[in-house]
Image: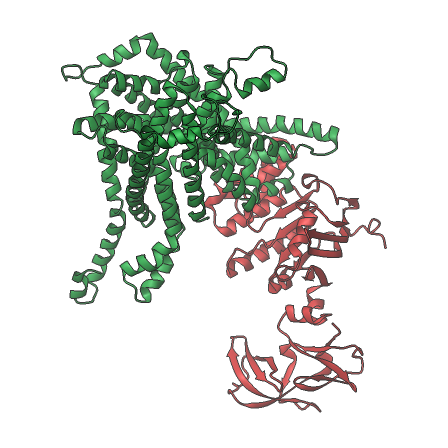
Chain colours: A green, B red
Amino acid sequence: MSNTTSTLPAGQATAPRDKRRFSIDSIALAAPGGLFLIVLLAIPTLSLIGLSFQGMDGAFSLSIYEQMFGAKIYIDVLVNTFSIAFQATVLCLVFGYPVAYWLSRLENRPRRFAMWFVLLPFWTGALLKNFSWIVLLARNGIANSVLQSMGMEAPADLLYQRTTVIFAVAHTMMPLAIMTMLPSMLAVDRTLVPASRTLGSKPMQSFWRVFFPLSMPGATAAGLLVFVSAIGFFITPQLLGGPRDTVIGQLLIQQVTQMLNWRLAGAIATMLLAVTLIFVLLYDRVFGISSVTGGASAKLSSGPVRDFGHRVLNLIAMIATAISEAFAKVLGGYRFGWLLPTVAIITVLVLLIPVVAFIPMAFGESSFLEFPPRGLSFRWMETYLTSPVWTDATLRSFYIALACAVLTAFIAGLGGYGVARSNGKLGSIAFMGFMLPMIVPNIVIAVSLAYFFANIGLLATDIGIILGHTVVSLPVVFIIVLTTFKAHDWRLDQAAATLGANRFQVLRHITLPMCQGGLIAGFLFGFLHSFDELTIAMFVGGGLRQTLPKQMWDDVILSVSPTLAAASLVVLLVVTVLFVLAEVARPRA
Amino acid sequence: MSNMSNPTTKLSIRGLSKTYNKTVALQPVDLEVKTGELLTLLGPSGSGKTTLLQLISGLVDVTTGNLVIDGVDQTDAPVHQRDIGVVFQSYALFPHLTVRENIAFPLQMRKVPADEIKTRVDDALAMVGLAHAGDRSPRALSGGQQQRVALARCLVYRPSVILMDEPLGALDRKLREVMQDEIKRIHRETGATIIFVTHDQEEALALSDRICLMNNGQIEQVGTPREMYEAPQSVFVADFIGVSNIFSGTVENGQLRTDAGLLPLSADAPAETCAVMIRPEDVILNGTASWALKGTVVESTYAGSETRVTIALDGDKSLIVRRPAKSEDMARGLAVTVSWDQAHARYLTK
């Protein structure tokens, strides 16, 4: 408590002042985060956008856009990007939904266990999984041997095909889709489906007319997040695609790192951002943006969209029921209970394949990557551990991740506390603000920051990378901290206050000990996020400050050597250990 | 006696039981429900009443026994073919549908023509007094209103049996009493057969045609509210229904030896009597009977229509007496004698 209140005479005059000050206090804690995001997200992005509307002489000009939309190559790249992103999103929803549905129906314990196998590929990051595919899908790789043993004549060209690119993008994004869909499925009242059964609906009708529409907010949020991430995604097209599969992300890398053409980069980023915003706004119109985070409203939407949706669902329900009832009649009962777990488990296994495949490859004997590896040796581990290029990159990644985790936990911790404690409009604005780095494509953030840092001398510095990583890891850490603080029973703090604890003591003895699990988890997830981040490191690092993922990227572009497998194994180990720690620390709702 | 031939039997249960892994949730039980009656399944939590309800609804698979509705064996029938209605404790209203769409749902499942659906939904809404709220979201309604929607959704397709799982549990006392009257009225008007689960004995007494009292996965006693209150067959029933004074002991020369002293037994008391039960309103203070127990007043609570007096007896035993409100106050520590008319005492054998 401040001195002013104690020196004033007790009475009515002090009460309202105290109250007002308190409410300002808590939301003010989100201010550092707000300032951070204005300086490192809003200003860089806006100035890059601004640049794209300037001509060479600095005056307003649309010349760069004319140039962009006038060249067929750019149009092709745009079409590629959206078509790959769209198809990958559809795949994610079609295969992710059954997995999430299956998870949602498990009991708590088996569900937690099964979720490890979805979360592990989520946190291993895109790089590793795509390296793995290069080896597995190579001309003389294991996928081809399997196909040949099944009767295929010549080895198929699995790499550098559009289908493979779409599959691998979907594969990379699938865990994100599953984790986004699951909460809204778990939030569906468990009595509703049994209730609909007692009201006379057949199993398929219950699913399509009751469960499915109630799970829609999560599914559409997943579609939005996957699509937005996929349009800025370049790792898979670069590694697994041919020249005809070039996407916007690759174009951006080329324009920035090779041509230093900031205006064109700005125009591409502007367009990416515009498309993203259009999708977000459309989504908000139809579902309300709060459903991304699982919030539900008491208001039913109305009008033609809803009617149409119900009609479509009723039609699907009718067809599905007819099929399932026909089978039930022939087979004497519903005999397809095994189908859902089978599809879900196979999907999860496919998610795990490239992650697990790396482990033996790191210990192979031959001088190129292959699966299954021949012989057992530690020579590549040795190469990795004795090469200064690799060890430098590893150490840099460690301390950048550590610094990023500390900074992120600090900003998100304060912000999460502030938002959790405020119910006002400012609170929801702050919430949206913290979520922004998730909505703006990472590659746009990366290019904008690179441009911004180039102007203020932070390009190719560790500090630049740390700041960039902090921007992109803020949303996840913020959500974890916020849910922790929201789940906290604040009456305990009030109880402590009535027992004579001052605000600092309450924080130290009650709030922090009770919320420490979530805070530790937030810290570890911040670390993880930074440790396997590539995009920011690529643009902001400027090719001089190599983090481990960036080093791996360069290595894979030049030559896929087994040293890469050894490095990947280290990343996998670090990620697994931290992720297990974080999951254990994280409190369960 | 065959149930099949008895036209007034709606639902008949024979040796129905449920075991989860190795835990027995319901021992094999027998129960008959008559057409048009309102039967409550009453009991403490864990007594098996909800399990029994779930077995009847078909939401849970039966371990042993069978279930006959309207003369047809429904033991293994799928839920949606049973023609039962369930009102859930949480109401289970579909949040993505309006009130009207919720009520229309069971009719749509039965492929009722659209114009008939409309009139029947209107009727159901009118019956529960929510004609104005048809186009609202269930989430925008109060608890009592949601309860009414759940009821309307169940009544609209006229199921042959309605199962209610503690439907009033989430309501406050005032609203609960209003809804009890409502359920009684609807029961009277529709003639529906209702099985009602509750743990609240007052609610069971107020609502039921008959009460089925359950304990430890078994049925303790089935009877009308009056039978349950006036003629309990076991210590558990006597203790669970209403307020009671129970003295357990052993029979000795035509008397019952208890901690509180020797109590007289009437000539018709069974030889295996293990306890005597007397209701608080039947206890006589400072009476003129040939026997009496001595005690002292420890508490006297004024409750408007009556005064409740707690009296300490020998052997750490205490006894509750209900006196008309206008009778004179009894001071703490006052020495009194207690006795009762033998005709009011109940002799319990288990």
Q: Residue at x 53, y 42 (%)?
A: A113
**Which of A571/A528 is in front?**
A571
x, y percent for residue B174 = 51, 60
On screen, residue A313 versus residue A479, left or right, reads right
Q: Residue at x 66, y 56 (%)?
A: B49
Q: Residue furthest right?
A: B1
Instruction: Residue A429: give x, y in percent of width and height.
Output: 30, 40
Residue at 24% from the left image edge and 38% from the top image edge: A36
Instruction: Provide residue A277's location: percent of width, then percent of height.
Output: 33, 27
The quadrant where residue B316 appears: bottom right
Q: Front-most of B336 and A274?
A: A274
Left or right: A176 in relation to A111 = left
User: Number of callouts in the render?
Assistant: 0
Is residue A569 shown to the viewer in this render? yes
Quadrant in the picture for the N terminus of chain A: bottom left
Image vertical order of residue B19 relative to residue B287, above or below: above
Residue A313 sits above or below residue B339 on the image = above
